[in-house]
Amino acid sequence: MRAEATILHVDLDAFFAAVEQRDKPSLRGKPVIVGGVGGRGVVATASYEARVYGVRSAMSSAEARSRCPHAAFLTGRFDAYRASSAQVMALLRRLSPLVEPLSLDEAFVDLAAADLDDRSVAGVTRVAEQLKADVAEVTGGLCGSIGVASSKLVAKIASDLEKPDGLVVVPPGTERDLLRPMKVGVIPGVGPATAERLRRVGVRTVAELEQLSVEELVRQLGQAHGTSLFHLARAQDDRAVVAEREAKSVSAEDTYDTDLVDRRLLEGLLERQATKVTERLRKARLSGRTVTVKIRLHDFSTHTRSATLPAPTDSTRVVARLARTLLTEVDTSGGVRLLGVGVSGLADWIQEDLFETEDPEPDTAPLPAVDLDRVTRSRQWSPGMDVEHAEHGAGWVWGSGIGRVTVRFETAETGPGPVRTFRADDPALRPRRVAPPDDAVADADAEGAGAAAGADQRGGAEPE
DNA sequence: TCTGGGGTCCTAGGACCC
DNA sequence: TCTGGGGTCCTAGGACCC
């Protein structure tokens, strides 16, 4: 928290809907709803005319339609939104080099890094008023709401106070008085689950939140969330405006209008998503080590399965194959409503390039299928393990825990491949229950056996 | 016609290292 | 022999944000 109100938060009003109304004059003054129009769509943005009818973001499109049947329902035109967003962000960067976009329609600007001679409340108010005028001009009439304060927390809350087309500057020193009467939910990070937990200990407002000790908050909400909320309740917030944030993951997911059961269809859809994700990775010159498959079943329960490769990849083949294998770990026989593929553990593609070999198409080398029925020799075994841990010609197989078997796909030709853990009850695994071979017991007893297995699991394979 | 899609961050447990 | 302790990596799930 600084002595001056130099953190500015801009939030474009009903952004997607506003772009539509700007581009299609016939929609102006009418309720416009942008979002999924399919059977399972939800509202991304509702114009203020639609909000009158109680239509809100994240509401199902079906409900929105019953509340406001005469609204224009549109699927998003994201290229148009991106273009307008870029215009606004460019404007912000002219104001200050320190701009942190939070999404297409929202950003923090650090005015302390701006070339400003008057940082008084009156001074930053003039800056914000000019900015609003500039936004309208460059975008062809879009409105934004602005909050300016001594911290990110208060600037963001302030930008929301007079929406749409709002401007609130919070004078330094008055932050806590502003927050105290507000519901705890105004604090970013306090969603329905946290609000409910707090309600159960008698806390509804920020003033009441202030009464809780840090120990009590940590007990209720965990270390990170508890301590952070303790400080935010007191308007203590030193988070910096960070201009360049690196992506941590890239993913694609789709919800289907009907629950899907057909295995081949699911695999095909997974493949398509893997293609989308890896194309985006390559475009961003990124690659990643961890592949995650997300599956939402008919009952809306959501499951993820992930596996980490020994080296980063941006290969469609590798990601698709691993995704397909991961899919087998979840029982989808009841029907799948959502399927998704993500890649995380991102690495800089350029850096990886330095280690590229001559092979122009390393992706095309097929990974060997590990035939678990032919697993013969136990590599590590400990009493009580459900599944034998073994190695065989096409790959290493070993246990990383009771009831689990980890396989590394690796051959002399392909080198280290993906590592994946199967559950003992995985139908794809069909482990044979065998007595541990003598040498495995000896290995397990021997000192250093664990270390050797660990090196392999790291994707090691490199000789020490 | 309940409940999108793209993300981020945190927790917790197990394995493993030193 | 009756049992370390800190740190990291990995996986699964959940809360949250726009």
Image (cartoon, coloured by chain):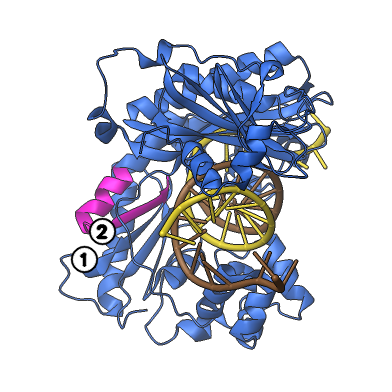
Chain colours: A blue, B yellow, C brown
Horizontal relation, residue A330 to residue A159: left or right: right
Looking at the image, do the residues carrying marks 2 and 1 touch, with CB atoms under 8 Å apart? yes
Horizontal relation, residue A300 to residue A25: left or right: right
Residue at 75 percent across and 74 percent down: it is A199
- Say if A304 sits above or below A280 in the image: below
Q: Tell me where residue A57 appears, x and y as whole percent.
A: 63, 47
Tell me which chain the residue with mark 1 is part of: A
Image quadrant occupied by the C terminus of chain A: top left
- Mark 1 sits on what residue? A113
Where does the magenta region start and end? Answer: A87-103
Residue at 43 percent across and 75 percent down: it is A237
Image quadrant occupied by the N terminus of chain A: bottom left
Q: CA distance from mark 2 to mark 1?
A: 6 Å
- Indicate which disc, 2 or 1, sits on the residue closer to the N terminus: 2
Instruction: Specify the amino acid type for callout 1.
Output: Ala
For the residue pair A137 and A199, the one nearer the viewer reads as: A199
In the rendered structure, find residue A69 and report the number of the disc placed on it.
Answer: none
Residue at 76 percent across and 42 percent down: it is A67
Which structural element holds mark 1? helix
- Mark 2 sits on what residue? A98
Q: Tell me where residue A451 appears, x and y as whole percent.
A: 50, 46
Q: Tell me where residue A251 appears, x and y as whole percent.
A: 51, 33
